[in-house]
């Protein structure tokens, strides 16, 4: 290689190096439009290629040697397919224009290296590999070997002469040149990417800062930032209004530099230094005074803000007005745990306090007491004077109970007229604790018994007051926390309160375990009674009713319950429970339907078509609004003569809401149903009420019949009832007739209808039919 050839190669190398410089200077990477960028890049590389080819080393006529394949391969490697095609087309066009013996090889040395560069770049991208000097040098060697392979296509007489002339620069110089230029382009591309990423990051950071400042500025919370020395760095608009300074005026100041009520206490300053030191989040509720003097409850959160490297820059404070939320929470708390009328704790809070007492005082040997306080006859006040009067009384009672007990004791309202007082620490001796509890209960009782002045609002202009007296029944459960559960404590006090009621009211009673056993037994019976109808355990017994003159008149049906385990359950045990629970209503309907079904059978038997069945009706059953409709429905369903059905009512039923009761009785009379007043003489009915009732019959109670032959008083009462019946044109029947002497006395005094053991006990229908057969055979003989 001569001097001119060496200079030509150096000039080629300089042009190659200038590629990176020119590309970087023209900032082609900053062109956003890819098509324009590719076109410009292709033209730039193509022009440099033309310049390289115009400074070639001419080996022989028509055969030129330069660095065009290095240039075009780097174009494929760094700039992409489109710029490579553009630059390659320009170089091939010039080579075709020059012509000569090496026209084919010269064109291939442009096309093949360009595509190899693009393929190499694609492989690196897919495998996510980074360019380094070794890969660039290896790529350069690949290109040079490919070019040497292309030179084998030259005419045979020139082939080895040319190869031997260029092999040294191709093998030793051009790979290094490719590596150097590639490293320059790679570093420039990385720098341009870093600059681009930096610019984009700055744009993103600026946008996020603007967004953050806008967001923070629009928040109603008080937000401020301080450095580690406690100097303000910034704040939002709400904080500006709070301190009365703009953000610029606030910057650099410390909290103690602010005027008014804004400066922190020494405790607050210490807390901030402590937060900055340990980096923990601080949160508390605090009252804040605004410039206008208003006092607001704030929830304040303070937290440090640090750099990515862990450097602590300062402290951020966020204060939120939670006054309204706190008020709502307190309101919800009161609704959930306090009675809205008396403002006393309610059942839920009482149970929570009881549970807390039991769980936290498990080893406490001291006795406590739970008072269950119920107002006697409170319903009467509500019914007669209205709920407003009842509410006034409840509020007054609540205040009196609270004033009677200690501050540490708890008074709660469970609902209605039921109050509870939880008295703690009565001592560790059961006897002394009982005396102390009784003493407190007596104070409560006496306090409640004092007169109340309740307001009566008759009209807008006047306001009157009435004196009202009230008495309580108080049940006491004495307990140790480690021995009793909260539910059991309440249950025992409730049972004791019912014992006080049973003792005549206005009384105090301690829990009696025997009473608890009885209540549990009643609860079990009631639960089983619910299933008795469906299980077919109920049965009607029939007790014959006889007229001395007319013979058999029918029967009274009496309910019996045959339990599969308990056997026959006495009506005394289950009828009161059924009435208290309301279960008497479905049971009473079943009795009516069963009685009407039996009447259907009797109406088809000659001689029995005029018999009556007497059915006892409870107060709760008769007071049903649709009772008349129910009876009519049953009559229609069984298609009976209504004259066969007689309903027995007690005096207590007819004396309550007498006008409504009389109206119902008239409606049932219109259907053809007769009424008998059961147990007459044991109640308190007045003659003025009695004469208004559409009765058919009075029934003399067996308590008077039992001793009429030995007790003059009972005899006089029975004679009076018979005379009264005759005066009011009522039939009269005596129950409990067991002896011939009793029957004869009754008949002699004008009562000819009887019911009792003299004739038959209550028996099932099959035995009743057998009895009827015997009596029908010789009625006069049966009557003696």
Image: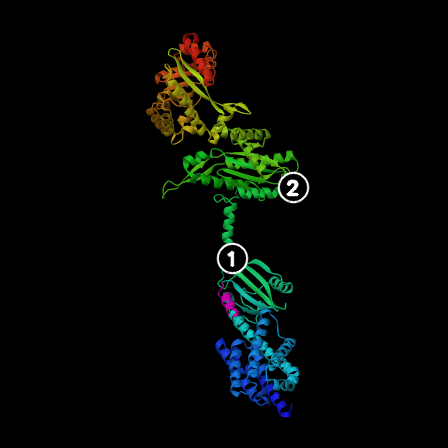
379 lies above or below 548: below
- Give the numbered dot on residue 364: none
Q: Front-most of 334 and 66?
A: 66
Task: Pick the quarter of the image with the N terminus.
Answer: bottom right
Q: Front-most of 52 and 165?
A: 165
The residue carrying mark 1 is 322
159 lies above or below 616: below
Q: Is residue 422 visible?
A: yes
* Main SS class of the magenta portion in the image: helix
Label 2, secondary structure: give it.
loop
| Quarter holding residue 8 | bottom right
Residue furthest left in the image: 670
Tell me if mark 2 has few (under 14), some (14-19) or many (20+) residues whose alpha carbon lies within 10 angstroms of its own: some
Tell me if mark 1 has few (under 14), some (14-19) or many (20+) residues whose alpha carbon lies within 10 angstroms of its own: some
105 lies above or below 650: below
**How far from the left and from the top, in percent, is residue 79?**
55, 77
Q: Is residue 241 visible?
A: no
The residue carrying mark 2 is 362
Q: Which residues are magenta?
A: 208-219
The span from disc 2 to disc 1 (Cα, nearest Å) is 39 Å
């Amino acid at each position: 290689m001569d001097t001119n050839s060496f200079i030509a190669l150096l000039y080629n190398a300089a042009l190659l190096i200038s590629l990176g410089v020119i590309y970087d200077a023209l900032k082609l990477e900053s062109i956003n439009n890819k098509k324009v960028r590719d076109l410009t890049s292709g033209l730039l590389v193509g022009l440099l290629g033309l310049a390289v080819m115009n400074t070639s080393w001419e080996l022989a006529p028509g055969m030129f040697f330069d660095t065009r394949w290095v240039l075009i391969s780097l174009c494929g490697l760094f700039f992409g397919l489109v710029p490579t095609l553009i630059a390659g087309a320009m170089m091939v066009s010039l080579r075709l224009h020059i012509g000569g013996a090496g026209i084919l090889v010269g064109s291939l040395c442009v096309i093949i290296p360009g595509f190899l560069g693009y393929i190499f770049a694609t492989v690196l991208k897919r495998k996510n590999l980074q360019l380094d000097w070794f890969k660039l040098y290896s790529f350069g060697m690949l290109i040079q070997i490919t070019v040497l392979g292309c030179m084998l296509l030259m005419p045979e007489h020139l082939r080895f002469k040319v190869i031997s002339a260029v092999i040294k620069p191709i093998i030793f110089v051009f790979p290094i040149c490719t590596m150097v230029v590639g490293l320059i382009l790679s570093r420039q591309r990385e720098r341009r990417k870093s600059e681009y990423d930096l610019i984009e990051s700055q744009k993103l950071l600026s946008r996020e800062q603007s967004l953050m400042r806008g967001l923070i500025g629009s928040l109603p919370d008080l937000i401020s930032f301080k450095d580690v020395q406690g100097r303000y760095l910034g704040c939002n608009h709400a904080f500006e209004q709070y301190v009365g300074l703009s953000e610029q005026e606030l910057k650099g100041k410390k909290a103690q530099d602010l005027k008014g009520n804004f400066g922190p206490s020494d405790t607050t300053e210490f807390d901030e230094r402590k937060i900055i030191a340990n980096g923990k989040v601080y949160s508390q509720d605090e009252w804040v005074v605004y410039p206008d003097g208003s006092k607001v409850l704030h929830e304040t959160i303070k937290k440090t803000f640090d750099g990515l490297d862990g450097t602590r820059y300062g402290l951020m404070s966020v204060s939120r007005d939670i006054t309204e939320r706190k008020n709502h929470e307190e309101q919800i708390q009161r609704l959930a745990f306090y009675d809205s009328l008396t403002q006393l704790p309610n059942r839920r809070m009482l149970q929570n306090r009881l549970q807390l007492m039991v769980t936290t005082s498990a080893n406490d040997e001291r006795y406590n007491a739970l008072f269950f306080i119920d107002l006697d006859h409170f319903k009467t006040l509500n019914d007669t004077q209205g709920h407003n009067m009842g509410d006034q009384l409840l509020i007054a009672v609540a205040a009196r109970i609270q004033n009677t007990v200690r501050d540490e004791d708890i008074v709660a309202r469970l609902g209605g007229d039921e109050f509870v007082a939880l008295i703690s620490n009565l001592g560790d001796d059961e006897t002394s604790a009982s005396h102390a509890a009784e003493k407190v209960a007596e104070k409560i009782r006496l306090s409640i018994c004092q007169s109340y002045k309740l307001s009566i609002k008759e009209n807008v202009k006047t306001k009157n007051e009435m004196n009202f007296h009230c008495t309580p029944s108080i049940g006491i459960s004495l307990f140790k926390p480690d021995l009793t559960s909260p539910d059991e404590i309440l249950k025992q006090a409730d049972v004791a309160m019912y014992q006080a009621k049973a003792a005549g009211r206005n009384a105090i009673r301690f829990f009696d375990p025997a009473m608890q056993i009885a209540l549990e037994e009643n609860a079990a019976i009631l639960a089983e009674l619910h299933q008795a109808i469906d299980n077919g355990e109920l049965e009607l017994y029939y007790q014959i009713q006889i007229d001395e003159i007319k013979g058999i008149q029918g029967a009274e049906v009496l309910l019996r319950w045959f339990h599969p385990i308990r056997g026959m359950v006495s009506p005394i045990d289950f009828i009161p429970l059924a009435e208290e629970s309301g279960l008497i209503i479905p049971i009473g309907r079943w009795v009516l339907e069963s009685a009407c079904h039996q009447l259907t059978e009797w109406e088809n038997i000659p001689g029995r078509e005029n018999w009556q069945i007497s059915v006892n009706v409870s107060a709760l059953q008769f007071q049903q609004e649709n009772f008349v409709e129910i009876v009519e429905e049953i009559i229609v369903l069984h298609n009976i003569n209504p004259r066969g059905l007689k309903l027995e009512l007690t005096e207590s039923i007819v004396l309550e809401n007498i006008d409504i009761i009389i109206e119902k009785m008239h409606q049932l009379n219109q259907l053809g149903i007769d009424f008998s007043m059961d147990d007459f003489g044991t109640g308190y009915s007045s003659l003025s009420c009695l004469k208004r009732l559409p009765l058919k019959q009075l029934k003399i109670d067996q308590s008077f019949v039992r001793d009429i032959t030995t007790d003059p008083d009972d005899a006089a009462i029975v004679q009076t009832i018979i005379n009264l019946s005759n005066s009011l044109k009522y039939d009269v029947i005596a129950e409990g007739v067991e002896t011939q002497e009793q029957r004869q006395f009754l008949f002699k005094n004008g009562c000819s209808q009887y019911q009792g053991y003299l004739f038959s006990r209550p028996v099932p229908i099959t035995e009743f039919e057998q009895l009827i057969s015997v009596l029908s055979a010789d009625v006069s003989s049966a009557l003696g």
